Structure formats: structure tokens, C-alpha cells
Image (cartoon, helix red, strand yellow):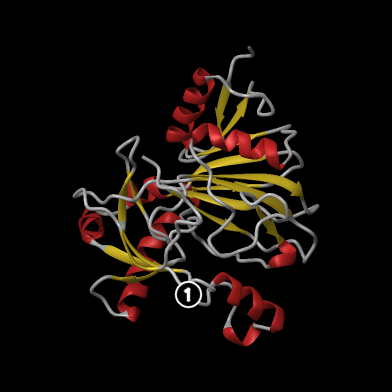
């Protein structure tokens, strides 16, 4: 078996992995090595990957049960666990962690390049662990005490006046089930014990604060997540797969490719219920996601 090689891409996030054939079943030793690399680097990039939807799902299953494609958005036809991230279905370019509006968001996401524009279309992935470490001590102490309500029911993609009939239909689909869940602003990673800022675009309100107060505080905390030093800017090539730890990262798909075709396929791994620094778990206010995901042990 070729030896796995892991090369850092930036100081705080990202590594390229070679020496692993993702089209074959992986042995336990390889899975352990990849899991350890994911814990350290938060995002792993694999080049020269020749997978179909089935192969992508098989790879993701090495890390746990997989979810269905999305709680409300349709899957790839004939592949209920695969979400098409397609420019034809909208360009939701905003910072977020996948599906944080449910009680147990995915622990990990895989993205595979299907159709790559000749320029632009990068994915930004940020380390929320590095962001937490960057916080000044007074702000860190405050963040440790906060909880935030996450929801899918808000206009995150486009301003209201820009919504045409097609976008309105997409929004209606996205919010066809309303979810509201309260998560700790500082989440403890269940495998590493690292603390990370668990916020992003679906975090709409700090518990106990008004919406305007919440917005100011969330913007301040978010500014540490999106510092350039904490961000991997990944320029896609054909036949690539990116695996990232959804528990301690955020990401953003840049709409900078002039409306050219861009398509990735996403498969996500079921996650655990987030836990704050005092051991308290997240709790659901509205919306049942049991059709979407199991709860990881």
C-alpha cells in the first residue's frame, strides 16, 4: 500500500492528501490516519479522484452514517443522500456551517467537483478553532457563556427586492419545514476537546439579546472566523474531493464566475448533538429532522 502523504496548505487550515485511492474500500488504519489528519487540519483535499455518487457515499461512510441530502432541498435524482450544489439552483454565497439549524448538524461534509468554471468559483473554508484562539480574553470569556438560535427561516441568499419567481420558489422549498435550534456559541469538539466558534449564517439571535444587539455581537465574533489567516481559499480543479470537519469550520462559495456552470456534489456524515464548555447540549425549539439524519454516538 502506498504511504499516505499529508502536506499543509496553510498554517491554520487545510492539507492535501496523496497515497490514498478513494475508489477502493479503506482499511481501518487508513481511516484512522485520515480522521487524525482531519482533526489536525480541519479540511483535507484529494486530487485525481475518480468517483461517482455511489463511490462518494462509500467514502463518506468510513466516517459514520450518512445523512439524506438535506432536510428540505431535493437530492440528486436517484441518489437520496447526495445534494447537488449547482449554480443553476442558486448561489447562496454566505458564510455558514452546514445545516446548523437542526439539533445535530453533520459532523463532516464531502464536496466533489463535477463541473468547474474556467475561473472563479472557489470555496472558502475557515477554522473556527483558530478564530476562538484569536479572541481577546474578555471577548473569549463572554463567548463562552453565550447560546445562539439558529434557523433556516430568513432571507440569507438575496435581498428581498431581488427575489424573482424562481428564487421565491427556491426559498419556499428551503423553508418548507421551519427549524429553530439553540446551540452553544462556543462548541467543544467531541474528539479533540478543541473549542470553536459555532456560529455562521444560520445563527440569527443570541439568547437573551434583541435582534439588533445579537447582530452586532455575532458580526464581531464572525470577524475572527473570516480573518484571512484563518481561511483556506480553494480553487477547484476537475476530479477533486474536499472533506471538511463541519463541527469546527465554516465555508463560503464565492459567486465570482459570471454565471458559468458550476456543480459539486455533497455528501454529509451524521453528527452528534453539540455540547458547550459546561457540558450542556443544544436543544431544539421547532422542527423535526429525524427524516434527515441519525444522531452520531
Residue 243 picture location, percent across and down: 56, 40
Q: Which residue is mark 1?
A: 153
Q: Is 230 in front, or is 54?
A: 54
Residue 60 picture location, percent across and down: 57, 37
Q: Quadrant of the C terminus?
A: top left
Image vertical order of residue 139 relative to residue 149, above or below: above
Looking at the image, the residue that sits furthest to the top is: 1
Q: Quadrant of residue 87?
A: bottom right
Image vertical order of residue 288 relative to residue 292, above or below: below
- Residue at the image point whose x is 45% and y is 56% from the top: 290
Say how many tags the image has: 1
Residue 218 picture location, percent across and down: 36, 67
Residue 5 picture location, percent across and down: 58, 21
Image vertical order of residue 33 relative to residue 190, above or below: above
Query: Is 31 situated left or right of 80 in this image?
Result: left
Looking at the image, the residue that sits furthest to the bottom is: 161
Q: Residues within 10 Å of mark 1 (few under 14, many from 20)?
A: some
Q: Is 254 in front, or is 265?
A: 265
Q: Quadrant of residue 107?
A: top left
- Residue at the image point whose x is 47% and y is 45% from the top: 270
Query: Is 226 situated left or right of 141 in this image?
Result: right
Disc 1 is placed on an element classified as loop
Image vertical order of residue 76 relative to residue 160, above or below: above
Q: Quadrant of the N terminus?
A: top right
- Residue at the image point whose x is 34% and y is 79% from the top: 211
Q: Is 65 in front, or is 13?
A: 65
Amino acid at each position: 500500500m502506498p504511504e499516505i502523504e499529508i502536506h499543509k496548505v496553510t498554517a491554520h487550515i487545510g492539507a492535501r492528501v496523496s497515497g490514498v485511492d478513494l475508489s477502493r474500500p479503506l482499511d481501518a488504519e487508513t481511516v484512522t490516519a485520515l480522521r487524525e489528519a482531519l482533526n489536525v487540519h480541519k479540511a483535507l483535499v484529494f486530487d485525481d479522484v475518480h468517483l461517482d455518487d455511489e463511490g462518494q457515499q462509500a467514502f463518506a461512510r468510513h466516517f459514520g452514517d450518512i445523512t439524506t441530502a438535506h432536510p428540505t432541498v431535493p437530492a440528486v435524482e436517484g441518489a437520496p443522500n447526495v445534494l447537488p450544489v449547482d449554480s443553476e439552483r442558486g448561489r447562496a454565497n454566505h458564510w455558514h456551517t452546514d445545516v446548523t439549524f437542526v439539533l445535530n448538524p453533520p459532523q463532516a461534509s464531502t464536496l466533489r467537483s463535477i463541473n468547474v468554471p474556467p475561473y472563479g468559483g472557489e470555496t472558502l473554508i475557515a477554522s473556527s478553532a483558530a478564530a476562538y484562539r484569536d479572541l481577546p480574553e474578555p471577548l473569549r470569556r463572554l463567548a463562552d457563556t453565550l447560546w445562539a438560535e439558529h434557523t433556516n427561516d430568513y432571507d440569507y441568499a438575496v435581498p428581498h427586492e431581488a427575489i424573482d419567481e424562481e428564487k421565491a420558489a427556491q426559498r419556499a422549498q428551503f423553508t418548507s419545514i421551519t427549524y429553530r435550534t439553540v446551540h452553544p456559541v462556543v462548541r467543544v469538539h467531541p474528539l479533540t476537546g478543541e473549542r470553536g466558534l459555532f456560529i455562521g449564517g444560520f445563527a440569527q439571535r443570541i439568547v437573551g439579546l434583541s435582534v439588533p444587539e445579537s447582530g452586532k455581537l455575532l458580526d464581531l465574533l464572525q470577524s475572527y472566523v473570516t480573518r484571512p489567516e484563518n481561511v483556506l481559499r480553494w480553487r477547484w480543479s476537475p476530479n477533486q474531493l474536499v472533506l471538511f470537519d463541519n463541527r469546527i469550520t465554516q465555508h463560503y462559495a464565492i459567486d465570482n464566475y459570471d454565471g458559468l456552470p458550476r456543480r459539486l456534489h455533497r455528501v454529509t456524515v451524521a453528527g452528534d448533538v453539540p455540547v458547550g464548555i459546561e457540558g450542556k447540549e443544544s436543544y431544539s425549539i421547532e422542527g423535526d429532522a429525524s427524516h434527515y439524519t441519525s444522531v452520531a454516538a
